[in-house]
Image: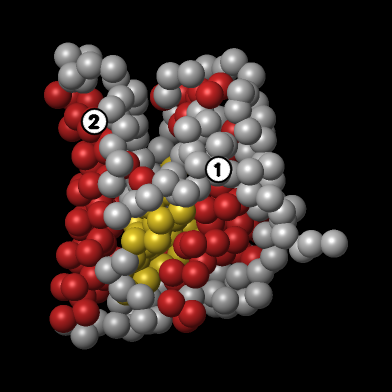
């Protein structure tokens, strides 16, 4: 009897039920329901006593990171952006608190530098500091033609996906002790851009460069803060039925022939924040279901 499961059949594969949601989408409406590691993730104390901020932590990859971090011993501040996400955020907090860890919710717009500064201050006030910054929140919307993409939406995408990282890193770094980590969510689109995600893919390419560059700056300053990124492939989150065409077919082009579940992405964020990755900086860990990302 094998301990391992076939990656092709471990989780649901398309076609999924026909579905559509309003942006940004919610977990409750997803068919099938996503797995964030609620029943499967087992912690081993890799992050005991750590204090983390997770943007976009209410659902999807962010929720999976929050659950994994709590089971590894971390307290978390969970940022999210929309009132419609209140219940998702509360559910994430409940999973964190079931592990005996502290969960602090903060709803706000990370495109606003003042709010980003307030988020970091919240970590200090509620957790006593910040050891791990997870820049995970993102905006995307599919467009088939260049004409469909407005300048306003282009700005929204870059302000959400990359400018917020600059704000948060600038506020957090002076408060982070040696051994701390910044982990940014890049994407397979950093390397293999989807034709319907021009602005999103471009912003993810910028995140890839920002990660490598900031890592070098902090290393040269001997701050002892490591900066890395995770580049997920297709992942089954509320963004998919709310922003992508034909979500019922999502992930079928992956070599594994299905999208990842958030639970399959979160361990990368645990590894990059842990002492096991102490010699890794400026790197991007690709979790793409076999899509080559170089």
Q: Can the viewer see residue 258 in this picture?
A: yes
Could you say where residue 290 lies in the image, as x and y percent from the top left? 47, 49
- Callout 1: helix, strand or loop? loop
Check the image and report above or below for 163 versus 133: above
- Taking depth in this image into account, of 247 and 71 the one nearest to the observer is 247
Please indicate whether residue 180 sits to the left or right of residue 144 in the image: right
Please indicate whether residue 259 sits to the left or right of residue 272 in the image: right
Q: Which residue is mark 2?
A: 198
Please indicate whether residue 74 sits to the left or right of residue 22 in the image: right
Q: Which residue is mark 1?
A: 256
Rendering quarter of residue 72: bottom right
Q: Residue at point 52% right, 31% down?
A: 252
- Callout 2: helix, strand or loop? helix
Q: Residues within 10 Å of mark 1 (few under 14, many from 20)?
A: some
Q: Residue at point 66% right, 30% down?
A: 32
Could you say where residue 201 lies in the image, as x and y percent from the top left? 27, 38
Check the image and report above or below for 204 versus 273: above
Check the image and report above or below for 277 versus 249: below
In the image as oriented, which residue stretches furthest toward the right?
Answer: 1
């Amino acid at each position: 009897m094998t301990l391992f499961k076939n990656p092709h059949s471990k989780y649901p594969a398309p076609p999924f039920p026909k579905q559509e949601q309003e942006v940004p989408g919610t977990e409750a409406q997803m068919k099938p329901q996503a797995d964030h590691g609620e029943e499967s993730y087992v912690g081993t104390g890799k992050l005991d006593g750590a204090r983390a901020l997770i943007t976009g932590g209410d659902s999807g990859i962010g929720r999976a990171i929050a659950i994994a971090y709590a089971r590894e011993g971390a307290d978390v501040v969970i940022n999210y952006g929309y009132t419609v996400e209140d219940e998702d955020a509360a559910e994430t907090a409940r999973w964190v608190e079931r592990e005996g860890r502290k969960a602090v919710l903060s709803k706000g717009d990370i495109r606003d530098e003042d709010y980003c500064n307030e988020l970091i201050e919240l970590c200090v006030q509620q957790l006593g500091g910040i050891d791990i910054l997870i820049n995970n929140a993102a905006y995307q919307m599919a467009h088939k033609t260049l004409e469909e993409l407005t300048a306003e939406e282009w700005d929204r995408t870059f302000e959400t996906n990359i400018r917020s990282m600059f704000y948060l890193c600038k506020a957090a770094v002076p408060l982070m002790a040696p051994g701390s980590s910044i982990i940014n969510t890049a994407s397979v689109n950093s390397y293999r851009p989807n034709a319907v995600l021009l602005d999103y893919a471009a912003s993810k390419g910028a995140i890839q460069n920002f990660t490598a560059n900031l890592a070098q700056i902090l290393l040269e300053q001997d701050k002892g803060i490591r900066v890395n990124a995770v580049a997920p492939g297709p992942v089954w989150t509320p963004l998919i039925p709310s922003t992508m065409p034909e979500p019922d077919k999502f992930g079928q082009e992956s070599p594994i022939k299905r999208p990842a579940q958030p639970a399959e992405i979160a361990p990368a964020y645990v590894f990059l924040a842990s002492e096991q990755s102490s010699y890794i900086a400026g790197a991007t860990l690709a979790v793409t279901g076999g899509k080559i990302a170089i």
